[in-house]
Image: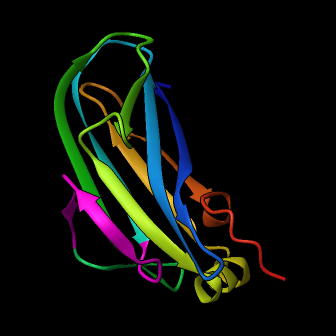
Amino acid sequence: MSAIIKIFHEAIEVTEQLHWYGLNVDLTPDLGHNGFRLEILWPFHIPITSNQNFEEGDEQDVLGTRYIPLMLYSDQKFLSGQNLRIIGPESNAILVYEIDKGIARLIKATSLKLYYKLYLPENLPVEGEIPFDTLNDFLIS
């Protein structure tokens, strides 16, 4: 493995009807590197309200669900074991999304996931997925 990736959310504003969250991604590489590329497949049905420094690709179908590819590029140098926030408030990449009751039901019913692939120089890609029900706090009955 060439890096540890931690993906989590932070509540920005919460009302009874609508929640806004910021996506946070921390990267801890095993070795020092000069830059990275992160590709995220974002579920089409989850609205993004703020997107800073991502390039958007053409819509893709993954297991019958529509996704939008989001790419983040950086030439930042970092050291082995250094923990970096590559998406979130302490970085220059921001992604804010909103969830209402209808979207929360869709997430629960379809098990929507966020897929990611991290490219580091001279390493194999690190890829994974995270269920979207862990990326929001909307409680539905």
Q: How many marks?
A: 0
Placement of 5 over or under 95, stated as above or below? above
Residue 103 in which image quadrant = bottom right
Residue 105 x/y as whole percent: 69, 85
Height in image: 79 above or below 87? Answer: above
Q: Residue at x 24, y 48 (%)?
A: 72
* Residue in the picture at 85% in, 83% down: 141
Q: Nearer the viewer, residue 2 or 71?
A: 71
Magenta residues, start to end:
43-57
At 23% from the left edge and 40% from the top edge, which residue is drawn?
92
Q: Is residue 59 magenta?
A: no
| Residue 115: percent from left, percent from top | 48, 59
Give the left or right position of residue 110, taking residue 127 as reference: right
Residue 15 or residue 61, whichever sits in front? 15
Q: What scheme was used to colour the molecule?
A: rainbow
Q: Is residue 33 above or below residue 123?
A: above
> Residue 114, image x and y in percent?
51, 62
Residue, far right: 141
In front here: 65 or 74?
74
Residue that lies at the very extreme toward the bottom in this rendered image: 102
The image position of residue 87, as x and y in percent, is: 36, 43
Residue toward you, 65 or 27 = 27
Q: Residue at x 52, y 86 (%)?
A: 64
Quick check: 62 left or right of 18? left
